[in-house]
Image (cartoon, rainbow, N blue to C red):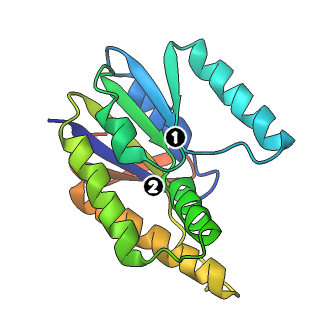
């Protein structure tokens, strides 16, 4: 049974760095499950820097923008799995459904999150999820942005409910919300 941790915070809050540090404190094989597709040259360079930094720290990288549950199921050889990030995963789900002239609903996201949690429960080690807190700002000015905020909010609620630990990172400081470990 996996130990499941959700790390949440705003953009540039230090959440990914904290999650990586937490993962590197565990023993065994580690994998970074990246959800970010390469969309332009700047993103390609950013991803390459992150991959290089993890490679020198003995990380393996898995890339999966959509099918997290399936990838988690197939990643049993890793003692620690860091999924970064759920926010981009929700973005990818929205994009893919729009491409087939469909919309993704909060229930769709909740169902996908339940699949991810079910896959995580069978993982033999630790799974750390990273996500953005997108609901603490102003109400977005357009319908697509409001939908995105709502879908990420639903994702975060479902994953947090199923996680053993939830840690909010603000200004680089981890603040436990659920569970007892830091």
Residue 177 quadrant: bottom left
- Label placed on residue 77: none
Q: Outermost residue toward the left?
A: 1
Q: Nearer the viewer, mark 1 or mark 2?
A: 1
Image location (x, y in percent) of residue 12: 64, 51
SS for dot 2 = strand
The residue sitting at 51% across, 40% down in the picture is: 64
Residue 115 quadrant: bottom left
Image location (x, y in percent) of residue 3: 22, 38
Q: Outermost residue toward the front?
A: 100
Q: Is residue 101 visible?
A: yes
In front of the other: 108 or 121: 108
* Residues marked 1 and 2 touching at CB (< 8 Å): no
In front of the other: 132 or 43: 43
Give the labeled residue for mark 2: 8
Categorize mark 1 by other alpha carbons within 10 Å: few (<14), some (14-19), many (20+): some
Image location (x, y in percent) of residue 76: 28, 26
Categorize mark 2 by other alpha carbons within 10 Å: few (<14), some (14-19), many (20+): many
Image location (x, y in percent) of residue 26: 33, 21
Q: Is residue 136 visible?
A: no
SS for dot 1 = loop
Q: Is residue 150 left or right of residue 157?
A: right
Q: Report the Cα–Cα distance between label 1 and label 2.
A: 20 Å
Image height check: is 97 above or below 160?
below
The residue sitting at 54% across, 69% down in the picture is: 134
- Label placed on residue 64: 1
The residue sitting at 34% across, 46% down in the picture is: 69
């Amino acid at each position: 049974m996996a130990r499941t941790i959700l790390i949440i915070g705003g953009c540039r809050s230090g959440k990914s760095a904290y999650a990586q540090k937490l993962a590197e404190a565990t023993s065994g094989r580690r994998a970074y499950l990246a959800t970010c597709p390469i969309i332009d040259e700047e993103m390609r360079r950013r991803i390459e820097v992150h991959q290089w930094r993890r490679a020198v720290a003995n990380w393996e990288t898995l890339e999966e923008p959509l099918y997290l549950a399936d990838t988690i199921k197939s990643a049993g050889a890793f003692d620690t799995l860091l999924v970064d990030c759920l926010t981009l995963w929700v973005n990818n789900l929205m994009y893919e459904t729009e491409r087939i002239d469909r919309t993704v609903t909060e229930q769709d996201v909740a169902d996908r999150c339940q699949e991810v949690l079910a896959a995580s429960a069978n993982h033999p080690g630790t799974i750390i999820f990273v996500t953005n807190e997108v609901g603490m700002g102003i109400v977005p000015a357009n319908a697509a942005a409001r939908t995105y905020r709502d879908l990420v909010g639903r994702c975060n609620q479902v994953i947090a409910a199923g996680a053993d630990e939830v840690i909010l990172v603000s200004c680089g400081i981890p603040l436990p919300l659920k569970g007892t470990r830091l």
